[in-house]
Amino acid sequence: MKLILLLSVLIVALVMSSAEHSTKSPEHFLAGFNIYRLPSEAQLIAKFGKPSSRQVRSEEGSVELTWVNAGCHLRIVTVLEIDGFTVKAIEVSGPRSCQFQTGLGARLGDSIERVSRLYGVSSKSLREANLSFRKATILFQDETQLYLSFSSKGLLTAIRLVSSD
């Protein structure tokens, strides 16, 4: 039991050490949406059509909407709060042809070097995180978080933007 606890602490420490603090303004946009001002579910359906899946997790009070089209995935996670649904995360994944990008211009298929220039973080630390986990985290001053997944060639394959709320 103690060994399992020790391993859990070590894994959490390793994951946390892969986070980089950005010197840029906080990222709030992904796939054309502001994570703090997302349109209603009805407006999303008007823009993208009916979601490929809609999962309601009553124990968490969350709704996950997912659209899949030609290998491109868009997922929006909302949580029910006192004043209505609040967006917790926007995720995109797929090939470069998906054309999803962040507000600063990071796109699926971008290299680690380009992402590091856009966000003012060390390309060396992103490369090291990629070698270890194929994932990296960028933290912003307002506690918004940007999670990045890379291929074995160091190309961006998925982006997840998580609000600080």
Image (tube, rainbow, N blue to C red):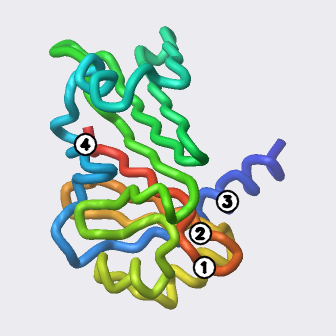
Residue 89 position by quadrant: top left
> Crowding near pointer 2: few (<14 within 10 Å), some, many (20+)?
many
Residue 77 position by quadrant: top left
Amino acid type, mark 2: Phe
Secondary structure beneath dot 1 equals: loop
Residue on which disc 2 sits: 150
Query: Looking at the image, do the residues carrying marks 2 and 1 touch, with CB atoms under 8 Å apart?
Result: yes
Secondary structure beneath dot 4 equals: loop
Q: Earlier in the sequence, mark 3 or mark 4?
A: 3
**62 shown above or below 67:** above
Residue on which disc 4 sits: 35
Q: Which mark is residue 154?
A: 1
Query: What distance separates the C-alpha of mark 4 from that of mark 2?
Result: 22 Å
Amino acid type, mark 1: Gly
Secondary structure beneath dot 3 equals: helix
Q: Quadrant of the C terminus?
A: top left
Residue 48 position by quadrant: top left
Q: Earlier in the sequence, mark 4 or mark 2?
A: 4
Q: Earlier in the sequence, mark 1 or mark 3?
A: 3
The percent position of residue 4, horizontal first and vertical second, equals 80, 48
